Image (tube, helix red, strand yellow):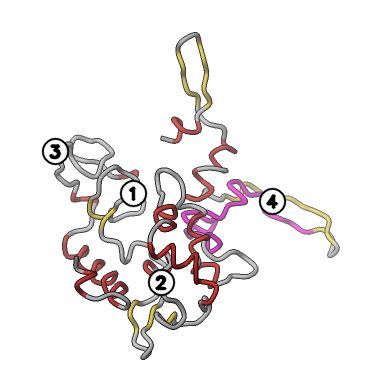
Amino acid sequence: LIISINGIQNFDGAKISLKDPDELTNFESCLYCHGTEVMVEGMSTRETVLGEMEFPVLSGWPNQGVGRINPDGSMGSCAACHTRHQFSIEMARKPYTCSECHKGPDVPAYKVYQVSKHGNMFASISKDWDFEDVPWVVGEDFTAPTCAACHVSLIADPEGDVVAERTHQMNDRIWWRIVGVIYSHPHPKSPNTAIIRNKAGLPMPTELTGELASEYLIDEEEMAIRQERMRNVCLSCHSTQWVDN
């Protein structure tokens, strides 16, 4: 996929071949969101106002991809959702932040949100919402969900009862995978979908018959748990008749 999109095209008469993409092209496209592996390649000495100091020489840097692998082995970048220096919860709660990586043709979540009724309400009246209150009180601080409200935020009702616990695991309330492939299936267990293989050895979550590659997907019990978490968020505004249908 990377080579087909970012690869360098070579034309030889009527034949087109693809060479491996330039590393910087990958950094500014796929790895911008997915994250690089940041490695310490050595040290350099530089003169500063405090005298000579040593600084690490890094490869894969700068990067703020959510799946970044850091030099200490930790994974992720907080700056993917709330940028350095401000570390704003308001920024993390607004859909513009999510659109940075969820806007393209393969993951058009932000475009879908924009033309939804929820997106319409956000665009029209969110200027009157409180994006900094903790917990985020549905019906008082905001009156229509953003991406964060549905997927990760700590949500409470006006009486102070918790509707949904805060999480930084983006799939805690997602039981179906509906983007990335042209059909839906139970959500993958691992965020690394490259490891998925069906019985035929193909990198697909199902067989061509529709049979699930169950080893790599969450089971019905986990699906029910995640669905109930999301259902609780929906029920904080909608009736059971609306939500269950």
Percent position of residue 147, x then y: 42, 64
Q: Disc 2 vs disc 1: which is toward the camera?
A: 2
Is residue 69 rendered magenta in the image? yes
Q: Which element carries disc 4, helix, strand or loop?
A: strand
Q: Amino acid at mark 3?
A: Thr
Q: Is residue 202 left or right of residue 211?
A: right
Q: Disc 1 vs disc 4: which is toward the camera?
A: 1
Q: Is residue 53 left or right of residue 206?
A: right
Q: Amino acid at mark 1?
A: Val
- Please report whichever mark, 2 or 4, sits nearer to the chain's N-terminal start: 4
Image marks 1 and 4: residues in contact by CB distance under 8 Å = no
Q: Which residue is mark 4?
A: 43
Badge count? 4
Q: Which element carries disc 1, helix, strand or loop?
A: loop
Q: Residue at x 40, y 44 (%)?
A: 106
Image marks 2 and 3: residues in contact by CB distance under 8 Å = no
- Please report whichever mark, 3 or 4, sits nearer to the chain's N-terminal start: 4
Q: Disc 2 vs disc 3: which is toward the camera?
A: 2
Q: Amino acid at mark 4?
A: Met
* Residue range corresponding to the magenta coloring: 53-80
Image marks 3 and 4: residues in contact by CB distance under 8 Å = no
Q: Which residue is mark 1?
A: 179
